[in-house]
């Protein structure tokens, strides 16, 4: 939810804060646990609100997208950067995160799921425990996002790697698969993918660059409420936070 996120992002930090609060509060009202990945700049802009949401049950992780950083001179995506530049980007964002929120992030996500083998190595060396790098079935190598269709939870280099739930057989745009986000799918899509899933859980992702949670006239909050209501009516949910996921 950063003003630097793209043409559909909030126009300023006030709108960004409104969007984060509305999204997280809606998820919490339905008894689920939102994991908010925030940039270093967002941690600086929204520290009191983020800490309040954490006290209410939300999880706060670090979001790194060098091409969106307000002080970035690198202008490209994580998976296309050298290992040294990736480490620098994570450290810069992480230092701001820790300074303003008072704790070190253990959860890490990259912009547009752009990552490579170096990204895993650096995240492990920097003592993250959980990462969200994979969008199964996405194939956009020009930005460093290219993942096989396999979408189960796995451990890589000691990190618990949690992919967003997708349907790789159905493409949306830019060779990205259909993924579970209220603003791009429907309650029926969620129920269908849940019924098809080989795992016992799903990961639903909402992005600041394609959602209008800050807009009173927007459609994303209504879509989110419909998805959560549909899933809750058809299934017994046992909400867990990303930080609690692990493999035996």
Image (cartoon, rainbow, N blue to C red):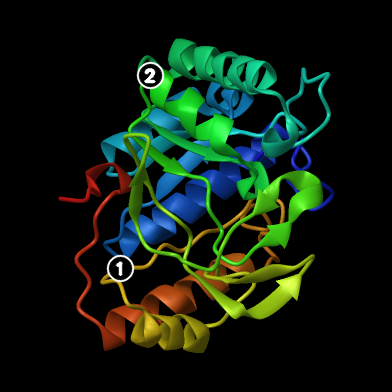
**Residue reaching furthest to the left:** 248
Depth check: give the residue in front, 232 or 128: 128
Depth check: give the residue in front, 22 or 191: 191
Instruction: Tell me if residue 23 comes above or below residue 52 in the rendering.
Output: below
- Asked whether, in this view, residue 24 is left or right of residue 115, the answer is left
Instruction: Tell me if residue 178 comes above or below residue 20 in the rendering.
Output: below
Provide residue 114's location: percent of width, then percent of height: 65, 44
Provide residue 207's location: percent of width, then percent of height: 62, 54
Label 1 packing within 10 angstroms: few (<14), some (14-19), many (20+):
some
Q: Name the residue under label 1.
A: 201
Label 2 packing within 10 angstroms: few (<14), some (14-19), many (20+):
some
Which image quadrant is residue 28 in?
Answer: bottom left
Number of marks in picture: 2
Q: Is mark 2 on a helix, strand or loop?
A: loop
Q: Which residue is located at x 52 percent, y 59 percent?
A: 205
Which image quadrant is residue 239 in?
Answer: bottom left
Q: Nearer the viewer, mark 2 or mark 1?
A: 1
Picture disc at residue 104 = 2
Depth check: give the residue in front, 120 or 238: 120
The reply to whether the C-beta atoms of the residues labelled 2 and 1 are less than 8 Å apart is no
- Asked whether, in this view, residue 75 is left or right of residue 49, the answer is right
Q: What element carries label 1?
A: loop
- Chain-order first, disc 2 or disc 1: 2
Q: Which residue is located at x 69 percent, y 18 percent?
A: 85
- Asked whether, in this view, residue 131 is left or right of residue 66, the answer is left
- Asked whether, in this view, residue 1 is left or right of residue 80, the answer is left
Provide residue 43's location: percent of width, then percent of height: 53, 25
Instruction: Tell me if residue 74 comes above or below residue 229 in the rendering.
Output: above
Q: In which quarter of the image is the N terminus?
A: top right
Picture disc at residue 237 = none
Q: Which residue is located at x 68 percent, y 57 percent?
A: 215
Provide residue 232's location: percent of width, then percent of height: 29, 78
């Amino acid at each position: 939810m950063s003003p630097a996120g793209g043409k559909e992002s909030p126009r300023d930090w006030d709108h960004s804060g409104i969007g984060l609060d509305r999204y997280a509060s809606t998820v919490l009202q339905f008894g689920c646990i939102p994991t908010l990945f925030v940039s270093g700049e967002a941690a600086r802009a929204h520290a009191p609100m983020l800490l309040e949401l954490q006290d209410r049950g939300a999880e706060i992780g670090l979001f790194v997208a060098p091409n969106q950083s307000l002080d970035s001179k690198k202008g490209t995506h994580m998976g296309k950067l050298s290992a040294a530049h990736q480490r620098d980007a994570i450290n810069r964002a992480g230092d701001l995160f820790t300074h303003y929120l008072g704790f070190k992030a253990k959860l890490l996500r990259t912009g547009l799921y752009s990552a490579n083998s170096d990204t895993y190595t650096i995240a492990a060396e920097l003592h993250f425990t959980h990462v969200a790098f994979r969008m199964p079935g996405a194939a956009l190598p020009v930005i460093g996002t290219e993942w096989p269709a396999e979408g189960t939870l796995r451990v890589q280099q000691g990190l618990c790697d949690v992919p967003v739930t997708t349907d790789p057989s159905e493409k949306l745009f830019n060779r990205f698969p259909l993924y579970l986000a209220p603003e791009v799918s429907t309650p029926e899509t969620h129920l269908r993918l849940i019924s098809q899933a080989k795992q016992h859980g799903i990961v639903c992702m909402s992005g600041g660059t394609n959602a209008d949670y800050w807009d009173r006239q927007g459609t994303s909050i209504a879509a989110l409420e419909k998805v959560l209501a549909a899933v809750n009516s058809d299934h017994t949910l046992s909400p867990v936070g990303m930080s609690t996921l692990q493999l035996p």
